[in-house]
Amino acid sequence: MTVIDGEAVAAELRSELQSRVDELADAGERPTLATVLMSPDPASETYVEMKQQDCEELGIVTRDVELPTDAPGEELFTAIDELNADPEVDGVLVQAPVPDHVDYRRVVERIDPLKDVDAFHPENVGRLVAGYPRYKPCTPHGIQRLLAAAEVDPAGKHAVVVGRSRIVGRPMANLLVQKAAGGNATTTVCHSRTEDLASQTRQADILVAAAGVPELIDGAMLSPGVVVIDVGINRVEADTEKGYELVGDVEFESARETASAITPVPGGVGPMTRAMLLYNTVKATALQADVEIELP
Ligand code: NDP
């Protein structure tokens, strides 16, 4: 049984990306990511700081735009327009969630698709579904990379994705079903209306759990040899200093008895999600500057 080390795979990718940032610098291009924060969730500030720190470690320049949560939505749209128009900015990321009085869909649609490093804009979603992705969304792309690093080829396998969210489940299924490297899986998508989830998960050669329900899936719901990718990050009360601990959507201890490989929480998918944002920023820079670099 292998515990797939997301930290290690992400570290290797970051080091590869570092050399692409250097190549771009030699060509006179400094990758620049703008983060926009207007979130009612206090955790968002930490997420943005982590993203900025990841960038700075690689020499990616960051721009920090912060708006008060009670600002009119138009202020956010104007900020996005300015970043779209700024030739020095390569990527624009608006940290979700935005306050209720702002229509998140309009926010996503406002970002220049070429600067859409989250890959949430309908043009980028459409390209992915159509089979010629420009940017891939960070979490599913990171998972695809993790599988490759663990030498798990989805081709011909039965992949079961639990969750159909816009940012994880559905794009994950789209990537797995693509007629392309890292795809070619027979793919099932489960959600909260799926009847008898266990009968579906037991058919999985590859299980991607992205439901956001602590330890929803245990070893009894898996078949021997399955590769388990646990996307869930759930805070549950625990007798620790912080008063909580993080658990995945999979019950690790029972699942590891049955699985051939499994990602831990934390230290599995999370670091890959962070690394793929750097990947998309580097790609966005190369695309917009028209500099040819070979991405890792
Ligand atoms: P959402 O809440 O947006 O989506 C959850 C999905 O799971 C929905 O499609 C929902 O179904 C489905 N679901 C919920 N309960 C069940 C159930 N009992 N059985 C089957 N399906 C169920 O979550 P996200 O996709 O944004 O995130 C999922 C998890 O992944 C969260 O824990 C989140 O914190 C984590 N996450 C981790 C990341 C990382 O980098 N590691 C990145 C992003 C997210 P329905 O559509 O019917 O409501």
Image (cartoon, grey):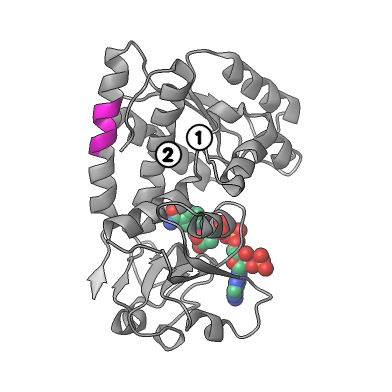
Q: Position of residue 17 (x, y in %)?
A: 29, 34
In-image side of 124 versus 100 (left or right): left
Label 2 C-beta lies within 8 Å of the nearest ligand 1 atom: no
Q: Report the Cα–Cα distance between label 2 and label 1.
A: 7 Å
In-image side of 249 versus 1 (left or right): right
Q: Position of residue 168 (x, y in %)?
A: 54, 56
For ligand 1, which image quadrant applies?
bottom right
The residue located at (58%, 66%) in the rendering is 163
Which residue in the protein does label 2 denote? 277
The residue located at (70%, 29%) in the rendering is 71
Could you tell me what secondary structure mostly forms the magenta stretch? Answer: helix
Counting residues from the N terminus, which is met first, the one under dot 2 or under dot 1?
A: 1
Amino acid found under the numbered disc labelled 1: Val
- Residue 212, compared with residue 113, is above or below; it is below
Residue occupying the far top of the picture: 28
Residue 229 shows up from this direction: yes
Asked whether 17 falls inside the magenta stretch, the response is yes
What SS does tag 2 mark?
Answer: helix
What SS does tag 1 mark?
Answer: loop
Which residue in the protein does label 1 denote? 117
Examine the image and state in which quarter residue 5 appears.
bottom left
In-image side of 120 versus 216 (left or right): right
Q: Position of residue 191 (x, y in %)?
A: 63, 71
| Range of residues picked out in magenta | 15-20
Question: Is the residue under label 1 in contact with that under label 2 (CB below 8 Å)?
Answer: yes
Amino acid found under the numbered disc labelled 2: Leu
Q: Count neighbours of disc 2 (C-alpha within 10 A) and say few if under 14, some if 14 to 19, many if 20 or more.
A: many
